[in-house]
Image (tube, helix red, strand yellow):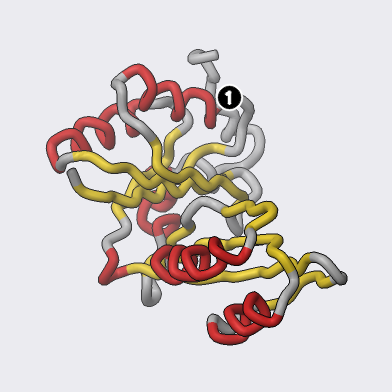
């Protein structure tokens, strides 16, 4: 098995996330990470999906994803060609050692009181994991971690490559309402 990161542009409409998630569920694939958010175009959202599966299964999943009515474009984000980041907020016991770990990892202290310190970290998955491993013995009280987000390096954009050929989300409001027959 191998880790794959997919960037998926979808129409910004109700039910799209549920359809994408159910596609993986029906096929028995687990989503390791899922981040969804707006893009520069208010009619388009971007999903970053991290999966652990073989190459042939990835091809099948990509083909099935592309068949969904609201999917505009799909691209695999290779490590060498993309920037990948996660966000972590973690509340730990406030002591000299946790402050030292925070300083070592160059993270932001977002909140501090006598008993706890809340740390904000943005970075590659391996860096976030290393921080958590160091903090764990010192009393993690609570944590929340985003899914991975990825962006292609350089001038290329997924939106430029897909929207210009598909025309889906760049059309006028009167023409862009796709029939949502999958609900």
* x then y, percent, for residue 138: 60, 66
Between residues 148 and 171, which one lies in front from this camera angle?
Answer: 148
Residue at the (16%, 40%) spot, across then down: 54
- Do we see residue 151 in this rendering? no
Q: Position of residue 105 (x, y in %)?
A: 54, 81
Farthest residue, direction left: 56
Figure check: 55 above or below 64? below
Q: Is residue 99 left or right of residue 31?
A: right
User: Quadrant where the N terminus lies?
Assistant: top left
Q: Position of residue 51 (x, y in %)?
A: 32, 42
Could you tell whether 178 is left or right of 162 in the image? right
Q: Would you say 104 lies left or right of 54 here? A: right
What residue do we see at 57% from left, 53% from top? Answer: 146
Residue with the mark numbered 1: 15
Residue at the location (72% across, 65% down)? 93
Observer able to see residue 130: yes
Question: Vertical placement of 162 versus 65: above or below?
Answer: below
- How many other residues sit within 10 Å of disc 1, few (<14), some (14-19) or many (≥20)? few
The residue closer to the viewer here, 93 or 158, is 93
Residue 180: quadrant of the picture = top right
Q: Quadrant of the C terminus?
A: top right
Residue 66 drawn at (x, y percent): 33, 33
Give the answer, above or below, for where 84 lies relative to 60.
below
SS for callout 1: loop
Displayed quadrant of residue 157: bottom left
**Residue plotted at (37% across, 73% down):** 153
The answer to whether 122 appears left or right of 58 in the picture is right
Q: How many numbered circles are shown?
A: 1
Q: Is residue 20 above or below residue 50?
A: above
Q: Which of the 4 image quarters holds residue 121? A: bottom right
């Amino acid at each position: 098995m191998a880790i794959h990161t997919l960037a998926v542009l979808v129409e910004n409409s109700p039910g799209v996330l549920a359809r994408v998630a159910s596609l993986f569920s029906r096929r028995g694939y687990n989503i390791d990470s899922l981040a969804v958010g707006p893009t520069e175009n208010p009619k388009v959202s971007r999903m970053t999906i991290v999966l652990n599966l073989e190459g042939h299964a990835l091809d099948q999943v990509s083909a099935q994803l592309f068949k969904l009515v609201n999917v505009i474009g799909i691209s695999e984000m290779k490590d060498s060609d993309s920037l990948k980041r996660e966000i972590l907020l973690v509340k730990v016991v406030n002591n000299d050692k946790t402050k030292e770990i925070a300083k070592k990892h160059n993270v932001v202290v977002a909140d501090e009181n006598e008993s706890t310190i809340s740390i904000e970290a943005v970075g590659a998955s391996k860096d976030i994991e290393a921080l958590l491993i160091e903090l764990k013995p010192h009393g993690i009280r609570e944590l929340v971690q985003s899914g991975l987000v990825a962006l292609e390096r350089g001038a290329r954009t997924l939106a430029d490559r897909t929207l210009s050929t598909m025309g889906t989300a760049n059309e006028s409001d009167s023409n862009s309402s796709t029939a949502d027959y999958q609900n």
